[in-house]
Image (cartoon, rainbow, N blue to C red):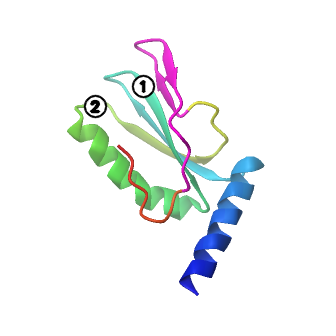
């Protein structure tokens, strides 16, 4: 039964993301000046729960001035390094199933 729910959740997340209704965690850091998007998620509560780990990872990497927003969106670029004027596309992965992000 768990596999059926997992597959259904994946289909729902992909569908919601395709039409722009998925939830994403947007994290903006002041130092370095970057914007990161993590997701997609099926619900805002799933996104909020996951945001803690993303924040911890950024703090370990030395990021400062961290602001977090959970919102429905469809980001084209997942990492925007404003200090460097660069945009990086991390491979989008579903937000479930023990996903590990670095």
Q: Earlier in the sequence, mark 2 or mark 1?
A: 1
Expressed as whole percent of the image width and height from the top left, the position of residue 30 reads 35, 24
Circle 2/circle 1 CB separation < 8 Å: yes
Q: Secondary structure at mark 2?
A: loop
Expressed as whole percent of the image width and height from the top left, the position of residue 74 reads 67, 41
Magenta extent: 78-94
Question: Compared to 18, does 5 lie above or below?
Answer: below
- Our reading of the magenta stretch's main secondary structure is loop
Q: Secondary structure at mark 1?
A: strand
Question: Which residue occupies the foreground of this view, 69 or 41?
Answer: 41
Question: Compared to 88, does 22 lie above or below?
Answer: below
Q: Is residue 55 left or right of residue 69?
A: left
Question: Compared to 71, does 32 lie above or below?
Answer: above
**Count of numbered circles on the image:** 2
Quadrant into which the C terminus falls:
top left
Task: Say which residue appears at 59% left-offset and 62% top-offset.
Answer: 43
Question: Which residue occupies the foreground of this view, 91 or 63?
Answer: 91
Query: Residue farthest to the right?
Result: 19
Distance, label 2 to label 1, CA atoms, is 9 Å
Quadrant into which the N terminus falls:
bottom right
Expressed as whole percent of the image width and height from the top left, the position of residue 16 reads 72, 56
Expressed as whole percent of the image width and height from the top left, the position of residue 46 reads 51, 63
Which residue position holds label 1?
34
Which residue position holds label 2?
63
Task: Say which residue appears at 39% left-offset and 47% top-offset.
Answer: 101
Q: Is residue 20 left or right of residue 24?
A: right
Residue 10 badge: none
């Amino acid at each position: 039964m768990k596999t059926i729910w997992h597959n259904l959740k994946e289909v729902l997340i992909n569908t919601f993301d395709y039409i722009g209704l998925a939830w994403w965690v947007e994290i903006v850091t002041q130092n370095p000046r970057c914007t990161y998007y993590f997701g997609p998620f099926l619900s805002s509560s799933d996104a909020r729960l996951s945001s803690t780990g993303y924040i911890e990872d950024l703090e370990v990497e030395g990021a400062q001035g961290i602001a977090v927003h959970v919102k429905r969106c469809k980001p084209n670029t997942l990492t925007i390094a404003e200090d460097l004027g660069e945009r990086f596309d991390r491979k989008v992965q579903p937000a479930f199933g023990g996903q590990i992000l670095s």
